[in-house]
Amino acid sequence: MNQQQTKALNKKQKNQQPKPARAKTQTKTQAKIQTRVQPGIQTGVQAGVQAGVQAHQNHIQEKSKEAETFCSFIYNPRTGAVLGRTRSSWGRILLFYLVFYSLLSAMFCFTLWMVLLTLDPDSPKYSDLLQNPGLVVRPQVLEISFNRSEPSQYSAYVEQLHRLLHKYNDSIQAANDLCLDQDPCAVQRKVCQFRRSSLRSCSGLTDPHFGFKDGRPCVIISMNRVVGLKPSGDPFINCTSKVPMQYFPPDARLDRMFFPYYGKRIHVSPNYVQPLVAVKLLPSRRDVGVSHSITCRVEGSGIKNQNFRDRNQGRVSFKVQITQ
């Protein structure tokens, strides 16, 4: 080995000698840092745990205080208060509301009494919408459909007509007046007679089935009562249909002696009845099984029957279908 190689080797050894010292220094520094950091971390964790425990304890204490507060609100044994009020406080507030609502009820009753004093018990104060009465058909259904060979299908219709005409029995109507001379100044108006027998074959006296058994049923038309209504002419019922029909009374007239109607107190008799018109349908064989529309109107007076906004004013429409 020559001298140059020896120098290079020594130089290389010198360069390699400090490195272990640096490694040792770094190891010592890391150990010191770890020694300082670990106690800090442990201290922070312990503080966090203690804070969480303290917060939980505070939450439990708050809940217990709220429960004690609610229980003391319901009933406080120290003051004897119920729902935050003592006996005297409850007594004063109940007395206040008792007096308040008593005065309010008295004021309402007084106002209602004053309003009732302005009303007429015999006739409505405002009756602009009731000057044109409607008609009612019995049996009171929109479509009369039955098989004349099945009594169970028309027995309900027959029962309706019998109930309607019961108060028109001649024996009951005999107590009413013939109304040959009505005094317009009389305080109490007479109740005029309308005998059931005037409906003849539709009276239910000679034929208790009102023609339903024979396929020639009777329907009864009446006009609604309107207090103070007095037709200007001689009103009568006019029905239109493709089926032939017969009227009872024969002229289908609503006698003017039954008008006007003055109310229940002035018409003192409990047997007051309005006039009726019976319509007997006379269908032929080709009409059997066909649904026929029938419209009946009041004619011959000032009662309106062409109001398309109110199709029940002064008229009534229904259907009849007969099978066998």
Image (cartoon, helix red, strand yellow):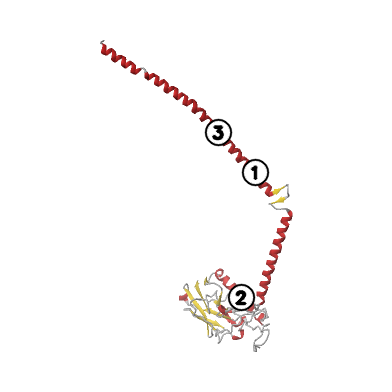
Q: Which residue is mark 3?
A: 47
Q: Which quarter of the rendering shows the N terminus? A: top left
> What residue is at 64 percent from the left and 42 percent from the top?
64
Distance between mark 3 and mark 1 Cα atoms = 27 Å
Q: Nearer the viewer, residue 47 or 192?
A: 47
Q: Position of residue 3 (x, y in %)?
A: 26, 11
Label 1: few (<14), some (14–19) or many (≥20) C-alpha neighbours in 10 Å: few
> Can the viewer see residue 36 in this picture?
yes
**SS class of the residue under badge 3?**
helix
Q: Position of residue 65 (x, y in %)?
A: 65, 43
Q: Position of residue 265 (x, y in %)?
A: 67, 79
Q: Which residue is mark 2?
A: 164
> What residue is at 71 percent from the left and 64 percent from the top?
99
Label 2 near label 3: C-beta < 8 Å?
no
The label on residue 65 is 1
> Can the viewer see residue 221 in this picture?
no
> What residue is at 72 percent from the left and 55 percent from the top?
89
* In the rendered image, the vertical position of residue 61 relative to residue 319, given as above or below: above
Distance between mark 2 and mark 1 Cα atoms = 77 Å
Disc 1 marks a residue whose amino acid type is: Lys
Mark 2 vs mark 1: in front: 1
Distance between mark 3 and mark 2 Cα atoms = 97 Å
Mark 3 vs mark 1: in front: 3
**How many numbered callouts?**
3
**Mark 3 or mark 2, which has the lower sequence index?**
3
* In the rendered image, the vertical position of residue 207 relative to residue 75, given as above or below: below
**Mark 2 or mark 1, which has the lower sequence index?**
1
> What residue is at 39 percent from the left and 19 percent from the top?
20
Disc 3 marks a residue whose amino acid type is: Ala
Among all residues in the image, which is located at the extreme top? 1
